[in-house]
Amino acid sequence: MKITTVLFLLITQLTFSQYKDVKVEGELQKWKKITLSFKGDTFTESQEDNPFLNYRLNVVFKHKNKTYKVPGFYAADGNAAETSAKSGNIWQVRFTPDEVGEWTYEVSFRNGKNVAVNDAADAGKPAAFDGLQGRFEIAEPEAKAKGRLVYTGDRYLHYAEDNTPFLKGGTDSPENFLGYYEFDQTPPSHKYEPHAKDWKQGDPTWQNGKGKNIIGALNYLASKGMNSVYFLTMNVQGDGKDVWPWTDENERYRFDCSKLDQWEIVFNHMDNLGLMLHIVTQETENELLMDIGELGVQRKLYYRELIARFSHHLGVTWNLGEENGPVHWSPKGQNDKDRKAMAKYIKKQDPYQSLVVLHTHAVPKSQDLFLEPLLGYQFLDGPSLQTHKPELVHNITKKWISESQKNGRNWVVNQDEIGPADTGAKPDKDDPGHDGIRHQVLLANLMAGGAGVEWYFGYKFAHNDLKCEDWRSRDILWDQTRYAIDFFQQYLPFTEMQSADDLTDNKNDFVFAKNDNTYAIYQAEVKATTLNLFGSKNSFVVKWFNPRTGEALQNGTVRKIRGGGKVDIGFPPKKDKDWVALITSKSQSRKGISNSKKEVVKLDALKDFTIDEPSDNTVYYSDEANGVLAINAADTAQRAKLAYASTRFEKLSGLYNLSFISMAENDGESEYIIFKNGTPIATVTNPETDKAFKVATHDLGKFFIAENDIIQIASKAVTNNKIPENNETAWSRGRWSRLVLIPEGVSAAAALEGKKPFEEKNGLLEIEAEAFHFSSKNGTERAWVIKSHSEKTDQSETASKNTYIQAVPDTRVTHDDVLIEGENFFPFAGVGGVVSYKIKINKPGRYYVWASVYSSGSEDNGVHVGINNTWPESGARMQWCAGKHKWTWSSAQRVPENHCGTPKTIYLDLEKGETILSFSMREDGLKMDRIILAKDASFSPN
């Protein structure tokens, strides 16, 4: 039995003695809404002293180490949904506790001009019940609860109670869902009369039975297994022109208390049904309506009011705006600064940090324009995608998942609107099978790693985006959406899976994989299919899922397969239309690496890669003398064709910076392709060289690499027609030696945020080495540490300011000590421990890098230098030979023909502005005292 508790708490710690009680209403249980009502002076919505703008109510709730600052609001008489009151003396705060036990609260109530949008704690002056304090006890919920949907840093929302991942399925139409005729002061756009029969006894209503139809509509949608509803809270000057939270469509500073309380009744019911509130705060036609698009008083007040009244709900998405940003057909709109300001303000004001997204325009070009600047932005959690052409959904979803991973903040990528605008998702009577959108939208998003779909209804069909009255018009579509979500939830570890479409040879397959464990292969058209299980020793069971009917899994023509190479998966029980193959490992126990630490991974061509079977008569051979794989270009059949080698990644899943090391040749500039799970992720070409062999390092960028991913490298022999050989010209042989993966750890750029840079003046910049801004082991066992005079070392006695840095521990002191690549020796730049300095360049151009180093031998006399986490060849292998056992300056680069290097050959090309200068270890034990960057090529330190 539910128990509603009403407490009148007498408070003695009051500034104003006439305010002596607070009413606490609600079920005092975890994950249940609690409303605190306070009595103050009587106000009206329209009075000159604006209660919405000139008063600010905040309540701080505390439980042990948790603190929530929750904004409150003017509530008229406290019962406005029923009375339609426009005046009263009640202020309210709504709060949803997430812990059992005692909670305390303290009230801040301030009065002053525009104080509601002033975040300064002491803004305005105390009013009425300011300073009031109290406490209440929260019990366990009577029924099992999943809790709040929260963004946890991966590409899916999770329920806070048990961390269950969430996949969205719901409706995008009607966007003017709140244009309902029984809300106060609302144009009667919608009545939802077909859903009157879906209202149930005991469901909420207001004012003697109002609201039954809209409540019934939500009942129906939830009964179909849907969990999200998209709606605008303001469409003034927009398409519908029937929804706004204010007392009038031309008002911006005063809010309709009764209408918003009636919305709250509907939203409460959505909570009870498990329906997410997808709150779309504006549309493209009105994004300049408030403060000409900027974050000013009107916009802040609008967002604060929405957050105060509705943020407590357990499933909330804050959408910054539909089709946000200017395009040719809507040329005036918000800019990147406006979007970032909105997102930040909502995140800062919302005590629960619910999902913040941006709805996009329909074509990729416009999406790129507005989304790319937001990648990695800490206050935006993902895009709300609109896509004009459904066939693009899969690749667009993959793109934004990948790009957000690379930028260090995973986005939740939902498909919330599909085109063409006149079509969308048709009614069942017009498209009873929904074959096209099931393939191109629903499964396309989910199989790409997307977080779900909301369905938009095109304007040429019945029950369209602005005029939908009956959600039963898409009854079959809701079923198919539920089938897909249930399949993912029941059978797939989807939070650990990723798109890997090229693991099969069929170009139209969608493949979703946790390599060596679980594979889902969606076939829009059934064809003979082989799955690449390279390197796997597991056996697998093959089952088939029918996404049209949602039936139990079925057997096909092949029931079991074994890993090791490309394997035929057989056919489903019927070859009609589309099917999903579910392929799961039979192995119950697998050696995991979940407890492994991040480390630099070096994949050696000769040791770690397997040469693939000849493809079109092209195959690698092992060039042991050079430590590379190569192609026999003397065989004319193997020229200008790709050879392949593969490996399975057996380290920790994560974001890595990839460096590819090839061997450039004077015969030609060989081309290379790096694949992940069969998909090309990078293509590079060797630089020109006049040397027979020259090591070339290629920075490929950041990529997410998962445990058991198949990494493949291909190259081909080419000729530049420059080197005569017999009756023709010589060919390069596509030689390469390794792929290096450096784990993404703490970002130097993030660590240096706010640091004062070392500034170049008149083409010269000098730095004390120990004054670094950032250091990292970079996944290794070596670190840069500061050594000082207090340690009584010989070197500190003579070092500048008696202090220097050293790469430690130093385990290779003499030539007889064991050289262990990746431990005490790092031949490739950016692999070993890193030390970084924030610098500011006023005169851009080429700067020669000098460093003062103390070297005792050939085992501690090398380092690499780079810029902005890139490591150009011009900064590699900085070397010291002369001047042992004393501090010595050098700017020489070690090269094969001259191990001591030529002086003044280490340089960096620097742009104007702030940047990050970094040194990475080459040999442990090296000691570094001072650094100089000089624009003058003739400069030499004293």
Image (cartoon, rainbow, N blue to C red):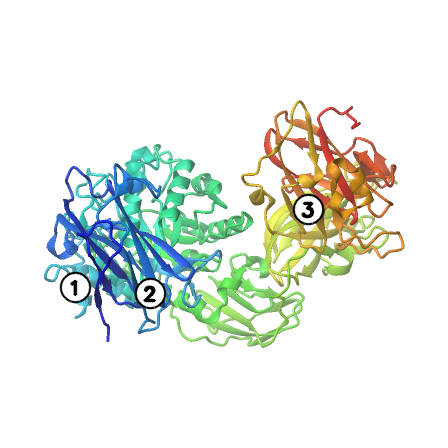
- Nearest to the eye among marks 3 and 1: give it: 3
Q: Residue at x 54, y 56 (%)?
A: 507
Classify residue 712 as left or right of residue 251.
right
Earlier in the chain: of badge 3 and badge 2, it is 2
Please determine whether, in this image, residue 220 is positioned above or below residue 38: below
Q: Which mark is residue 535?
A: none
Q: Amino acid at mark 1?
A: Ala
Quadrant for residue 292, please give it: top left
Q: 10 Å neighbourhood of mark 2: few (<14), some, or many (≥20)?
A: many
Q: Which mark is residue 196?
A: 1
The residue where tag 3 is placed is 834
Q: Residue at x 28, y 63 (%)?
A: 221
Work out whether residue 844 or residue 97 is closer to the camera in this orientation and state it: 97
Q: CA distance from mark 1 to mark 2?
A: 30 Å
Q: Amino acid at mark 2?
A: Trp
Q: Amino acid at mark 3?
A: Val
Please determine whether, in this image, residue 224 is positioned above or below residue 117: below
Q: Is residue 731 visible?
A: no
Image quarter hosting the C terminus = top right
**Mark 3 vs 1: CB contact within 8 A:** no
Classify residue 232 as left or right of residue 398.
left
**Residue 588 pos. (x, y %):** 58, 77
Farthest residue to the right: give it.
816
State the SS at label 3: strand
Q: Which mark is residue 31?
A: 2
Earlier in the chain: of badge 3 and badge 1, it is 1
Earlier in the chain: of badge 1 and badge 2, it is 2
**Residue 187 pos. (x, y %):** 15, 47
Image quarter hosting the N terminus = bottom left
Work out whether residue 325 or residue 576 is closer to the camera in this orientation and state it: 325
